[in-house]
Image: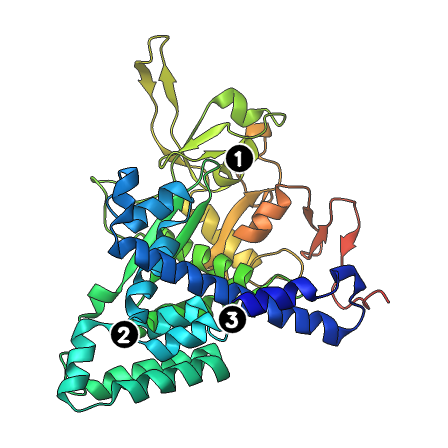
Amino acid sequence: MRDLLQTLLDARDLDDLVTADQVLDRTALLVAVRNAADAELTRTVRRAECMQAPERDGQASMRSWLRGHVRLSAREAARIVHNGRALEQLPAVAAAFAAGAVSADQVAVIAPVAAVEVQAEAVGQGVDLTEVDATLAEVAATQVHAALGAVVQRFLDLLDPDGKEPDPTDERRLSIARHPDGSRTFRGELDAVGGEKFETWLESLVQANRPAGDTRSRPQQLADALVQGVDNALAAGQVPILRTVKPHVFVRIDLDDLVDPAVGRAAGHTWFGAQISAARARMLACDGSITRVVFGPDGHTLDLGRTHRVVPPPLRKAVELRDEHCVFTGCDAPSCWCDVHHLLHWVEGGETSLANSALLCERHHTKVHHGFRIERQPDGRWRTYRPDGTEIVLGQPLPV
């Protein structure tokens, strides 16, 4: 560790590095220093755990101490503690970690080999654990990350070839973090078969809608496909009923805010507590169901109107037959993925009619509510215009 730090301190200032070799060498050195620092941290945390040091600050464990005193995430704190325990059974891996050749993430991949039941089974079968330890250290230090996981899994499978098949439902978990602005962050794990099903379903949605000129990243396309799959499921009405009501997106918004184009964020409130803009609420209202509710000054309901569908089924069918797919230039998303958009919104006096309707997928429905514009020509062709007024035309040569 000291040697690595000294080498880093002796290195020239970053601004003095002018060749690719110099920058890449420095990058490799920094990774090695980080690995060695992580190794020393892991070793120290393990020592503190064995000494029950967290009790001094009134904490029950090093996990809780790391979360509270140095503000690590629960996941990272758990990984450090778990790695420290595992490395006691893996001296060769520990040495490679301390030398900076192995990362904390790689140690976490190897850690299952150090489990008590695994070690006991290996000893019972006459497996040389010293050799296993050395092999894992070498693979971690010399091969790509994916290869290490495959080697570890292979060892575990060979150790218990006839073991009980795990229940796949025990290997699945999903957490959803809801942020103040209503956005969500997902973290989850799936078993091999469940993951294969999920990726197959998601990929089918990605490949079914690849409009021309879509330059979004792969993660953006996958996220869009996930939302589209949820849209399809909700629209099909095949998900379980919640308290006699079919699941749907619920938005509460004052009428004055809904019709006032000047109203910005936080005008609408969803069922799960998110706040959305009036513009977003108007987009959802293009092809949704509306219920008028009148409240008195004391908050009691004075009048509850009937829920009615903005676009009745016969009109939607007519729009689908006419447009066939999303009419935004360059998109061919199927009609079952699309909303019926009001060219002139009904809150502004626009009619709910075939002439005032167009099929738009969610992505392009959003675009049209944020500056883009679509027009249907007398010959039935649709044209799309950017917020600056220029038309989107397919087949145009790219600017040099």
Disc 1 to disc 2: CB gap under 8 Å: no
Q: Amino acid at mark 2?
A: Gln
Residue located beneath label 1 in the image: 282
Q: Quadrant of residue 71?
A: top left
Q: Identify the residue at horizontal 42%, vertical 67% (top origin).
A: 105
Which scheme is used to colour this image of the protein? rainbow
Q: Secondary structure at mark 2?
A: loop
Q: Mark 3: give few (<14), some (14-19) or many (20+) Cα within 10 Å.
A: few
Badge 1 or badge 2: first in the primary sequence: 2
| Residue 35 screen position, x and y as percent | 49, 67
Of residue 364 and residue 92, the one placed in the foreground of this image is: 92
Of residue 44 and residue 310, the one placed in the foreground of this image is: 44
Q: Marks 1 and 2, Cα distance to the nearest angstrom?
A: 61 Å
Q: Amino acid at mark 3?
A: Gln
Which label belongs to residue 207? 3
Q: Mark 2: give few (<14), some (14-19) or many (20+) Cα within 10 Å.
A: some
Badge 2 or badge 3: first in the primary sequence: 2
Q: Marks 3 and 1, Cα distance to the nearest angstrom?
A: 29 Å
Which label belongs to residue 42? none
Badge 3 or badge 1: first in the primary sequence: 3
Q: Nearer the viewer, mark 3 or mark 1?
A: 3
Residue located beneath label 2 in the image: 89
